[in-house]
Image (cartoon, rainbow, N blue to C red):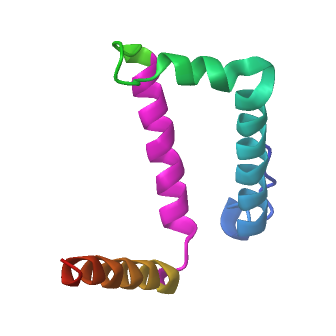
Amino acid sequence: MTSSLSGTKGVAPAPAILGDVNETLRSAISALKSDGISSRIQQELPDGNRLPDKKLTKLAAETVDLVAEIKHMLEPGHLVLADHFLDLNSDMLEIESY
């Protein structure tokens, strides 16, 4: 990341940090899509027919956790609350239909 330190007290401003995060994520997505990397990764992850590559599975899980943490940090609280409320209501509708 190449953020400028022009923010308050040596801290990069939020737009610069988010711009760097977006650039890094775009680069990662591009790398995963290039040269069939995505299909090779999918072939080596668990599919129920054979044992997965342990190291790759651990790295993939860590990547998913990091992306989820970023999403959690950036998603507005009212949207999270609305998602939970709507999910809870859909679960209740499913229960009532039995």
Could you say which quadrant of the image residue 65 lies in? top left
Q: Is residue 83 above or below residue 34?
A: below
Which residue is at the far front?
98
* Residue 52 is a magenta residue: no
Residue nearer the viewer, 9 or 31: 31
* Residue 66 is a magenta residue: yes
Q: Is residue 35 above or below residue 90?
A: above
* Quadrant (top left/top right/bottom left/bottom right) for the N terminus: top right
* Quadrant (top left/top right/bottom left/bottom right) for the C terminus: bottom left
Residue 1 visible? The answer is no
Residue at image coords 47%, 55%: 69
Q: Position of residue 64 (x, y in %)?
A: 48, 42
Residue nearer the viewer, 57 or 86: 86
Q: Is residue 65 above or below residue 5?
A: above
Could you say which quadrant of the image residue 34 lies in? top right
Residue at image coords 70%, 70%: 8
Q: Label the magenta part by its dominant secondary structure.
A: helix
Q: Position of residue 75 (x, y in %)?
A: 55, 72
Q: Is residue 64 above or below residue 49?
A: below
Residue 15 visible? The answer is yes
Bounds of the magenta span? 56-77
Q: Is residue 31 left or right of residue 73?
A: right
Residue nearer the viewer, 9 or 48: 48
Q: Is residue 35 left or right of residue 54?
A: right
Q: Position of residue 46 (x, y in %)?
A: 40, 24
Q: Is residue 8 left or right of residue 94?
A: right
Residue at image coords 34%, 23%: 48
Residue at image coords 80%, 44%: 2
Q: Position of residue 82 (x, y in %)?
A: 45, 85
